[in-house]
Amino acid sequence: MLKSNRDCSGKMDMKFDIGTMNNEYMTAAMPAESYMGGCGEALPGVVCPPVYECPQERVVNRTITHEVPHICPCNTRIINHHVYRHSFTPCYSCCEENVVSNVYDGCCGRY
């Protein structure tokens, strides 16, 4: 016979009476019509121990965004180029030179 007691935590303490256990298995194996009581009530069945299934794993993918500020120093350099353009304006001048030559034809004594 199956006997259960609950403790204060809500857990159920299952105890089996070996003498009546075979009788309960036989009753559970019979069709429901064969063990129906006179008032139409079914006899209680057997409570089996829990079956532990293969564990399942669930994977949760999370995306966590981290904002990382970056400071990028930017310097502006101004370079002034001074270009001197030279222009030449000619300033013309003129000079005159006189050269005197004396020619003496056939005359003597320079007269």
Image (cartoon, rainbow, N blue to C red):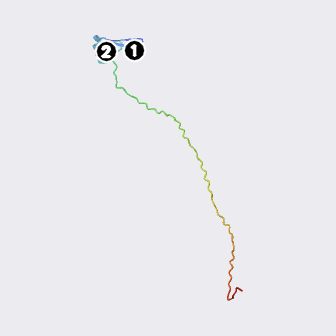
The residue tagged 2 is: 35
Taking 70 as reference, is 49 left or right?
Answer: left
Query: Which residue appears farthest toward the front when viewing the image?
Result: 109
Query: Which residue appears farthest toward the bottom when viewing the image?
Result: 106
| Quarter location, residue 54 | top left
One can see residue 30 in this view: no
- Give x and y (percent) for residue 12: 38, 14
Taking 20 as reference, is 103 left or right?
Answer: right
Q: CA distance from mark 2 to mark 1?
A: 31 Å
Amino acid of disc 1 = Lys
Name the residue rendered at 39%, 14% in the picture.
11
Q: Quadrant of the N terminus?
A: top left
Amino acid of disc 2 = Tyr
| Quarter location, residue 96 | bottom right
Q: Are marks 2 and 1 in contact (CB under 8 Å)?
A: no
Residue 11: mark: 1
Task: Compare residues 41 and 75 and report the one nearer the observer.
Answer: 75
Q: How many marks?
A: 2
- Give x and y (percent) for residue 76: 58, 45
Task: Compare residues 18 and 10 and report the one nearer the observer.
Answer: 10
Sequence order check: which comes first, mark 2 or mark 1? 1
One can see residue 24 in this view: yes
Q: Quadrant of the C terminus?
A: bottom right
Task: Compare residues 48 and 102 and report the one nearer the observer.
Answer: 102
Q: What secondary structure is marked by label 1?
A: loop
Task: Compare residues 77 and 65 and report the one nearer the observer.
Answer: 77
